[in-house]
Amino acid sequence: MKVEQIYTGCLAEAAYYIESEGEAIIIDPLRETKPYLEKLAENGAKLKYIFETHFHADFVSGHIDLAEKTGATIVYGPTANTTFDIHQAKDGEVLTLGKVSFKVLHTPGHTPESTTYLLKDEAGKEFAIFTGDTLFIGDVGRPDLAQKSGEVTQEDLAGWLYDSLREKIMTLPDEVLVYPGHGAGSACGKNMSKETWDTLGRQKQTNYALRADMSKSEFIKEVTAGLMPPPQYFAKNAKMNKSGYDSIDEVLQRGATPISADELELIVEAEGALVLDVRNEQEFKTGFVPNSIFIGIDGSFAPWVGALIPDLKQPIVLVTPEGREEEVVTRLARVGYDNTLGYLKIDVRKPTEFISQHALAAENIPLDYINNNMHKLSPQHTYYLHCGGGYRSMVFASILRARGFENLIDIKGGWKAIEAQANIAKTDFACPTGIPQEVIDEAIANAI
């Protein structure tokens, strides 16, 4: 038996490859199929099943394309209804793989169809659970993503999750391994550990949601407290996972097509395309296509795209680092942005400056909520922008410039650079007023 976790850091997502006697299962695959097909070929294995733990909201799964290319059966748990063929497993059903088996445990709460798969080894011993977003390391799945107005509330889902954990998961032996669908950084939970697996016994001791003396009402209160609104693309990704999508091969072929500057201009005018520049923020600062926006590929790319581009069908043309065009198209497709129309093949950037005479008084506008706060800003004013390290402020600045704002200062290196200039620790101050004015003046002077 072989069990392999395939972890993708930019999405904090874990897929799994399990193999026995030449048969394989893949759990919660990402959109691209090539890595899984290569792994199957390397091991000389045939894909028998694709297990989905639930309808994912934070990424588009590769289950449909992978099934078409391998002949494998897509498996969802009870209550999962799709527009494509699946095996809708029953609670308690056993599916075999070579000399091992999987028991289906319906564990609703994060979503109604959420399912945990219990792996038993060659001797029939309970070996591991693949919990999806039901149980994380240090946390549990948020219960507000699948609520339906007037039908199921987040409190209802939280109550179901409490029962699922205590009736289906906490009754298993302590030595069972826990393999979750996400780690720290995912928006599917509140306080996940940086660890990506653990034993169930340790989780019973350390995970607040598995506290033995916790009542259902206490659980519901703690799990629903402090939930931020989910990113706008979550519900749209869940719908794609349930209803289907374009072939990833078609998306890649269309998006990884080189286009000239003249073609870019025509596409922008004819299709209303957005020019998305994904290079390093310092490269973007040096020069860029007019009205383009910056979201760097080497930051938290997909979540920021999902938070800032409301329409998944938005036509997009790319400015990318050389050789990374297909990677960018793939990472867009992972979160449902399939309408990439090509990338700029030559450099026609026009130099510009993010600079002005002075900065106004600071106001806190998180990047996530820029679209909701545009009414607070005026193109006639000058703005001094910074974040923690310089990535988010450059994204913010690019969006403002695309909307007609010219008088912008972006502080190179962000607040960390100001701290370094001040040569004092964070604990020495609580706000910008704790830094000498001459230090801030020098940081502004060195901003670009």
Image (tube, helix red, strand yellow):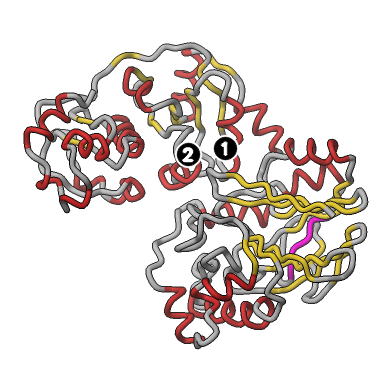
> Height in image: 72 above or below 157?
above
Relative height, residue 358 to residue 86 (above, below): above
Magenta range is 73-77
Number of other residues with Cα within 10 Å of mark 1, as a class: few under 14, some 14 to 19, many 20 or more: many
Identify the image quadrant of residue 226: bottom left
| Residue 379 picture location, percent across and down | 18, 34
Q: Earlier in the sequence, mark 2 or mark 1?
A: 2
Q: Is residue 89 magenta?
A: no
Residue in front for this viewpoint, 87 or 412 = 412
Q: Nearer the viewer, residue 303 or 390?
A: 390
Provide the residue designation for mark 2: 301
Residue depicted at 89% across the width and 68% down the height: 123
- The CA distance from mark 2 to mark 1 is 8 Å
The quadrant of the picture occupied by the C terminus is top left
Residue 81 numbered tag: none
Q: Secondary structure at mark 2?
A: helix
- Residue occupying the point 73% across, 55% down: 27
Secondary structure of residue under mark 1? helix
Q: Position of residue 345 (x, y in %)?
A: 53, 14
Residue flagged by tag 2: what amino acid is it?
Phe
Position of 362 compared to 21: left or right? Answer: left
- Secondary structure mostly taken by the magenta-highlighted segment of the chain: strand
Residue at far left of view: 437
- Contact check, label 2 and label 1, Cβ < 8 Å: yes
Q: How far across and down, in percent of the image, does residue 139 sit? A: 52, 67
Question: Which of the numbered marks, if any, corresponds to residue 331?
Answer: 1
Percent x, y for residue 382? 14, 33
Task: Give the amino acid type for the residue marked by disc 1 in the picture.
Answer: Arg
